Image (cartoon, rainbow, N blue to C red):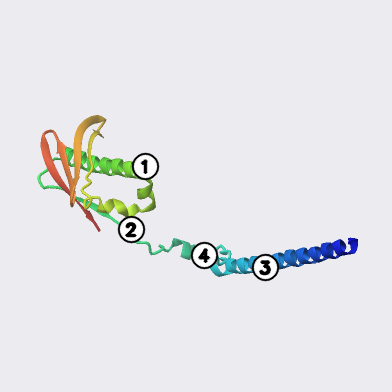
């Protein structure tokens, strides 16, 4: 009887050891497969060595094109009107930029602001422009192709040309 119980206990111990060994062998194989995925999907980049430039190379332009914007003003304006309109449009563009930078979507996709008209979204602002130390109230509204600037009861349509 004791021999029978001892035989059964040894048989159970053998099955347990075999089961644990099989489980650890399978887990080891899975770990090796998972470790093999890392080099396949995540390629290591080589460290970039700093490039030293000679004085002549440092003076050469990098070939980056700059975008130039040009305001198209109506003819027959006084110097005061030109300066107020220009300052108003520049102030408006800065205002719009600050408003849009608060939204995460415009920080991630900077070109998205160019299609706001398609969605029916337009900006309008009342600004105080300082010319020669005197503040002048101006209202600027963005319209397709430019801006409408209201100053001293007059309305000026200003275009913006990007070169």
Q: Residue 122 versus residue 161: which sits nearer the camera?
A: 122
Q: Earlier in the sequence, mark 1 or mark 3?
A: 3
**Is 58 located above or below residue 108 in the figure?**
below
Q: Earlier in the sequence, mark 4 or mark 1?
A: 4
**Is label 2 or label 1 in front?**
1
Q: Residue at x 69, y 65 (%)?
A: 23
Residue named by callout 3: 26
User: Are discs 2 and 4 less than 8 Å apart at CB?
Assistant: no
**Residue at mark 2 to residue at mark 3: CA–CA distance:** 60 Å
| Residue 50 in picture, x, y percent from top left | 56, 62
**Is 122 located above or below residue 132 in the figure?**
below
Q: Earlier in the sequence, mark 2 or mark 1?
A: 2
| Residue 43 in picture, x, y percent from top left | 55, 67
Quadrant in the picture for residue 83: top left
Mark on residue 66? 2
What SS does tag 2 mark? loop
**Residue at mark 2 to residue at mark 4: CA–CA distance:** 24 Å
**Residue at mark 2 to residue at mark 1: CA–CA distance:** 26 Å
Q: Residue 81 versus residue 160: which sits nearer the camera?
A: 160
What SS does tag 4 mark? loop
Quadrant in the picture for residue 88: top left
What SS does tag 1 mark? loop
Residue named by callout 4: 54
Residue named by callout 1: 102
């Amino acid at each position: 009887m004791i021999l029978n119980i001892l035989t059964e206990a040894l048989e159970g111990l053998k099955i347990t050891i075999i089961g644990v060994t099989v489980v650890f062998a399978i887990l080891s194989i899975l770990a090796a497969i998972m470790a093999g995925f890392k080099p396949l999907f995540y390629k290591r980049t080589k460290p970039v060595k700093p490039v030293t430039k000679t004085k002549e190379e440092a003076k050469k332009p990098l070939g980056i094109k700059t975008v130039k914007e040009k305001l198209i003003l109506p003819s027959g304006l006084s110097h005061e009107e030109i300066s107020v309109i220009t300052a108003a449009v520049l102030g408006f563009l800065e205002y719009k930029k600050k408003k849009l930078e608060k939204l995460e979507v415009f920080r991630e996709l900077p070109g998205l602001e160019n299609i706001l008209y398609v969605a029916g979204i337009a900006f309008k602002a009342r600004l105080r422009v300082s010319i020669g130390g005197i503040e002048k109230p101006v209202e600027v509204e963005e319209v397709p192709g430019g801006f409408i600037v209201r100053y001293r009861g007059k309305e000026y349509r200003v275009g913006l040309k990007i070169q």
